[in-house]
Image: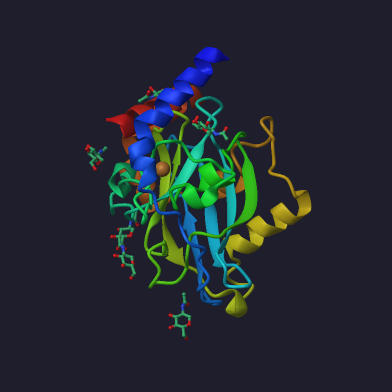
Amino acid sequence: MLVKSFSLFAVAAAFSAHAATVTPAPIATNCPSNASYVATLPKKAGNPLSGSVAAVSATDGKGVRFSVSLSGLPAEGGPFIYHIHAKPVPADGNCTGTGAHLDPYNRGEVPICDASKPETCQTGDLSGKHGNITAQTWSQEYVDLFTSTNKNDPSYFGNLSIVVHLSNKTRIGCANFTTQQSANNSSSAYPSATTAASSIAQSTQKPTYDISGPAFGSKTASSSPTPSQSQFAGSAVAHRVGGSAALFAFVVALVL
Ligand SMILES: *[C@@H]1O[C@H](CO)[C@@H](O)[C@H](O)[C@H]1NC(C)=O
Ligand SMILES: *[C@@H]1O[C@H](CO)[C@@H](O)[C@H](O)[C@H]1NC(C)=O
Ligand SMILES: *[C@@H]1O[C@H](CO)[C@@H](O)[C@H](O)[C@H]1NC(C)=O
Ligand SMILES: *[C@@H]1O[C@H](CO)[C@@H](O)[C@H](O)[C@H]1NC(C)=O
Ligand SMILES: *[C@@H]1O[C@H](CO)[C@@H](O)[C@H](O)[C@H]1NC(C)=O
Ligand SMILES: *[C@@H]1O[C@H](CO)[C@@H](O)[C@H](O)[C@H]1NC(C)=O
Ligand SMILES: [Cu+2]
């Protein structure tokens, strides 16, 4: 206990100079009602991770309602963290290119986000503010008050990206946010990820915790190969060897 307190004190002291200059993020009160974005993770050979993060303006225009719906997370390496990053994903899909977290108030990554004071966290630190991903299949919905769908707000993220990481920060998936048909104007021919994710969230209330559940969703299994998969034809070998070998190969590819 004493040791823990001391090390916490040391950490606090080390960053106090920085912390003193941190500007708390203001509540984003100006989110236009028609704004709707979704970041859909691309299917990649050897990586069963799939899903999306949808984002629509909160109904009162204060902040953004996020609907997180992910499956195929690895059996090991969690809890998983995810953030809005400051740059879009490069055309080649390399998650390293998304840079650091969206942090318009220059808070920096340390000390770690205190979820009880979300205004003091990095704006893009969604898992810091709303909780880590602690299962291989994950659905969660929440309003984040500090991100914005208004292009004039420094916390705007509609042209940025989402990145999913292992606990040790290795990037295991990333996707651009893209504009989605506005909620008022959605047709059944174009079902939104928001609709899908929110129906799950409404039926369960709490985040799904289902380690034994289908890590490989039926959508993954039935979908036809995407053009991006052909770029990764070489990793098909790793894919046949087995899940953990494929994950290892994939993680190595990301680290390199
Ligand atoms: C919302 O509507 C305004 C005004 O019609 C338009 O300028 C803007 O591009 C729309 N935004 C989105 C995200 O659709
Ligand atoms: C992160 O964790 C994964 C899985 O546990 C491991 O394979 C990888 O080597 C680690 N990466 C770093 C940079 O520590
Ligand atoms: C992400 O968006 C940027 C900016 O629009 C674009 O240049 C890039 O190709 C996109 N990345 C992917 C993987 O689609
Ligand atoms: C990904 O991009 C980083 C720099 O942004 C680069 O160092 C790395 O080599 C790239 N990885 C691959 C597999 O292209
Ligand atoms: C995203 O859009 C905002 C508002 O138009 C702009 O200020 C910002 O530079 C853009 N960011 C990137 C990475 O393109
Ligand atoms: C979330 O995961 C990160 C990375 O493992 C960890 O540092 C952090 O303490 C976790 N947060 C909570 C609230 O458990
Ligand atoms: Cu991140």
Q: Is residue 90 left or right of residue 244?
A: left
Residue at position x 46%, y 32% in the image: 166
- Seen in the picture, residue 129 relative to 87 is either above or below; the reply is above
Q: Residue 91 appears in which quarter of the rendering? A: bottom left
| Colour scheme in use | rainbow
Query: Could one spot residue 242 in this view of the protein?
Result: no
* In-front residue for pair 170/128: 128
Question: In this rendering, is residue 203 above or below 244?
Answer: below
1, 48: nearer the viewer: 1
Extreme-right residue of the structure = 203
Q: Residue 158's spot in the image, x, y percent?
A: 42, 64
Q: Quadrant of the C terminus?
A: top left
Residue 56 drawn at (x, y percent)? 56, 66
Does residue 12 lie above or below 125 as drawn? above
Please state the total of marks drawn on the protein image.
Answer: 0
On the question of residue 161 being in view, the answer is yes
User: Which residue lies at the image location 64% right of the left edge and 72% below the top edge?
Assistant: 188
Q: Residue 186 is drawn in which quadrant?
A: bottom right
Q: Residue at x 38, y 40 (%)?
A: 109
Out of 202 and 137, give the one closest to the viewer.
Answer: 202
Report ligand 3 position as a quadrant. bottom left
Residue 176 in picture, x, y percent from top left = 40, 56
Q: In the image, 1: left or right of 147?
A: right
* Percent position of residue 103, x then y: 37, 52
Where the N terminus falls, by quadrant?
Answer: top right
